[in-house]
Image (tube, grey):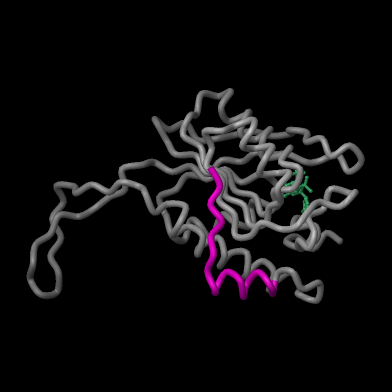
Amino acid sequence: MLTIIHHPLIEIKMSIMRDEKTKSKEFRESLDEIASLMSFEVFKDLAVHETDEIITTPTGSKLKKKKLDYKIILAPILRAGIGMVDGVRNMIPTARIGHIGMFRDEETLVPHEYYFKLPVVENPLVVVVDPMLATGGSACAAISAIKKRGYKNIRLMCLVGCKQGVDAVEKAHPDVHIYLACLDERLNEKGYIIPGLGDAGDRIFGTK
Ligand code: PRP
Ligand code: URA
């Protein structure tokens, strides 16, 4: 299933990120803010339960403290996924963080896994985060790697995607709900999303 999250604040911040003149600092800040805004949709169906802990409001009322039913693991695909972690974690401070090292071969566009570590938690919701869903190869490989370790409840949260990437994930992992901030027109011959925002990792970390 695919959800494209439409929101005027996301649209404005996306146009800052798309601008080639935007420097790394503002690029990172916008990514961080969009990740926070997207969290409202990605986590909107999570169940909440009342604990036995009693809180007292300033008006003297007694209420049961509420907690999320789910344990959340955020799994950024390195490197660029790291840029979305703080934005989501600001909304869910209890989220645990895993890391999936994956890079695309620039010629073949085939992803290569070089690192994998997820927290061991019973029945978590694993949210894979990566700004870019291009061919979908990296996301599919990351999700397969997560499933291979026994995790079942998985969502994918990306900023910019295209039809090819969405189709690839839906075909390989029909159980994984995909969330995007925008669905762009196409991929170019080098595997970049058009109009897109360029190389997300390089722009976040200033490597080019
Ligand atoms: C980028 C991006 C995704 C991947 C998307 O990472 O962050 O992980 O490409 O492309 P795909 O859908 O065609 O697989 P990249 O491999 O450039 O690594 P980096 O984040 O370390 O720069
Ligand atoms: N990875 C990126 O960083 N950007 C793209 O447009 C495609 C893949």
Instruction: Give the residue drawn at x 44%, y 39%.
Output: 125
Vertical side of 150 occupied by 177: above or below: below
Query: x and y percent of residue 98 in the render?
Result: 56, 40
In-front residue for pair 201/10: 10
| In the image, residue 163 lies in the stretch drawn in magenta | no
- The image quarter containing residue 99 is top right
In-front residue for pair 173/163: 163
Vertical side of 207 occupied by 48: above or below: above
Query: x and y percent of residue 60 in the render?
Result: 7, 71
Q: Is residue 168 left or right of residue 48?
A: right
Instruction: Give the residue drawn at x 47%, y 44%.
Output: 96
The quadrant of the picture occupied by the C terminus is: bottom right
Q: Is residue 117 left or right of residue 46?
A: right
Vertical side of 34 occupied by 95: above or below: above
Query: x and y percent of residue 153 in the render?
Result: 46, 34
| In the image, residue 14 lies in the stretch drawn in magenta | yes
Instruction: Give the residue drawn at x 63%, y 29%.
Output: 145
Query: x and y percent of residue 108 in the render?
Result: 89, 37
- The image quarter containing residue 58 is bottom left
Please give the range of residues in magenta.
1-16
Count all numbered tags in the image, as a single digit: 0
- The image quarter containing residue 24 is bottom right
Vertical side of 111 occupied by 79: above or below: below
In-front residue for pair 83/159: 159
In-front residue for pair 109/50: 109
Instruction: Give the residue drawn at x 74%, y 34%.
Output: 114
